[in-house]
Image: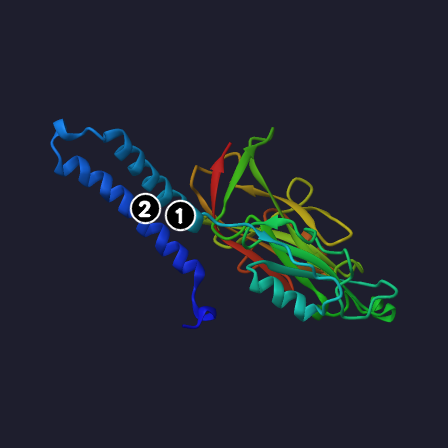
Amino acid sequence: MNLGAVDLEALVRAISISAGVSLVGGATGYFVTKRRKEWNRWKSVVVMGAAGLALLSATLMYYAWPSLINVPILDDMSRDQAEELLRSKGLVPESRFQYVSGVEPGRVIPRSQDPVAGLPVKFGSYVRFAVSIREEQLSVIGKSTDTLSLSLSEPRAGDKVRCSRGGDEVYRFSASGGSAGIAAGRYGLLLWLRPVNPPSDVPGWYLQRPPANGILKVEADGTWLGTAQVGNAQWPPQEGDIIDLAVTIADDDAIKNLMAEPGVIVKPQPVGVKTATAPSVSVTLK
């Protein structure tokens, strides 16, 4: 018998389930097949049944409850290796470019990842890290869309967002994510929202315009924070409404042209050279 071919996890799972079912079944059978006068060992049988239920419950919770994943060490890996490793563990890679002397171009800069290595995170979490480039490449970053990347981490597809009503009687919620390649100043970020259910009178993507809405802040490492508005004071959102959310990277000229348009801006598609979306987000009201 080849022990290396045995699926030990499946074997343990089968034994645990079998033992739990046997204990519960035995306890149940004791009370079903014997008359009440013969229940002289009922305390021991109840303990046996409870142990079986506990074993089955623990097994079920272990396999049904999403386990946490320890973030791996990415230091000095190539960008492709780091991304492949993260995806194999159910994590989402998000790289950015950075010049650091002494680190080979194309390699992950040591201690640049966030969250840090070894930290337990949920399945599907984003892991951000910096990739070294040559000093002369700094002038190229922001001039080619190949160096641009974008993510929308909160909310994600199918998530619920908690909207709070402000002093202007309008409901808003926060959104966040990451980006890379926009630091040179040629590009900026735009936030968009599309009502799905119920749909809006004017179908399309609504630009979230500053200062009350839109992308409020972009950090030096590319992470961003924004605010999106749902409905308006006259037509506020209702519990369970469904929306789509998107963030885009757009060049400065496109952003200036959009901001120069009067009134509410609605487009058939979000404007930009890169887009990250979170479809089917449901609204819950504070």
Residue 254 appears in the figure? no
Dot 2 alpha-carbon crowd within 10 angstroms: few under 14, some 14 to 19, many 20 or more:
many
The amino acid sitting under disc 1 is: Thr
Q: Position of residue 187 (x, y in %)?
A: 74, 60
Q: Secondary structure at mark 1?
A: helix
Q: Locate residue 238, reporting x and y percent.
A: 44, 37
Q: Secondary structure at mark 2?
A: helix
Q: Which residue is mark 1?
A: 59
In the rendering, which numbered label is found on residue 20? 2
Please report whichever mark, 2 or 1, sits nearer to the chain's N-terminal start.
Answer: 2
Task: Give residue 254's quadrant in the image.
Answer: bottom right
Camera-side residue of 10 and 111? 10
Q: Is residue 142 above or below residue 261?
A: below
* Residue 13 shows up from this direction: yes
Of 60 and 259, nearer the camera is 60
Q: CA distance from mark 2 to mark 1?
A: 9 Å
- Residue 162 position, x and y percent, is 53, 38
Decide if residue 90 is on the left or right side of residue 82: left
How many numbered marks, from 0 up? 2
**Badge 1: residue crowd in 10 Å (few <14, some 14–19, many ≥20):** some
Name the front one of labels 2 and 1.
2
Three-letter residue code for mark 2? Gly
Residue in the picture at 87% in, 71% down: 136
Seen from the viewer's position, the closer of residues 251 and 257 is: 251
Residue in view at x 66 percent, y 52 percent: 118
